[in-house]
Image (cartoon, rainbow, N blue to C red):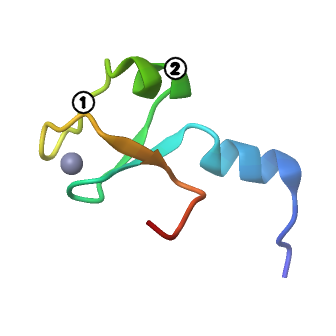
Amino acid sequence: MATSIPAAKNRLFKNIFICKSCGQKMRTDSIRVIEKTVRCRRCGKKSFRAAKSKKK
Ligand SMILES: [Zn+2]
């Protein structure tokens, strides 16, 4: 298994956030999540979590 490739992990997870309400994946900057300028395209909520933390 080619698991730990740091560049690939960064590319996959760095700017991916998941909506806390509906689970929609969004690719955006973390600064936008912090500033709450990004909105879920499915449910319209503004609360996201980082994609790498699997548990809630
Ligand atoms: Zn949502």
The amino acid type of the residue labelled 2 equals Ile
> Eyeballing the image, is 16 above or below 2?
above
Report if the beta carbon of the residue with label 2 is closer than 8 angstroms to ligand 1.
Answer: no
Residue at 73%, 44% (x, y): give it: 10
**Quadrant of the rendered image containing residue 43:** top left
Tag 2 secondary structure: helix
Query: What label does residue 39 carry, if any?
Result: 1
Give me the disc on residue 14: none
Residue on which the image places disc 2: 31
Q: Amino acid at mark 1?
A: Arg
Quadrant of image for the N terminus: bottom right
Quadrant assignment for the C terminus: bottom left
**How far apart in space, not on screen, are marks 1 and 2 (Cα)?**
13 Å
**On screen, residue 32 above or below 53:** above
Please give the name of the residue rendered at 18% of the width and 38% of the height, measured from the top-left corner: 45
Identify the residue at image location x=50%, y=70%: 55
**Residue 33 placement (x, y as % from top left):** 42, 28
Ligand 1 near label 1 (Cβ, under 8 Å)? no
The residue closer to the viewer here, 49 or 43, is 49
Task: Classify 3 as above or below 7.
Answer: below
* Badge 1 density bin: few <14, some 14–19, many ≥20, Cα 10 Å: some
- The image quadrant of residue 17 is top left
Residue 12: give x, y in percent of width and height: 64, 50
The 10 Å Cα crowd at callout 2, few under 14, some 14 to 19, many 20 or more, is few
Task: Name the image quarter holding residue 24.
Answer: bottom left
Q: What x and y, as percent, mark residue 14?
A: 64, 41
**Residue at disc 1, secondary structure:** loop
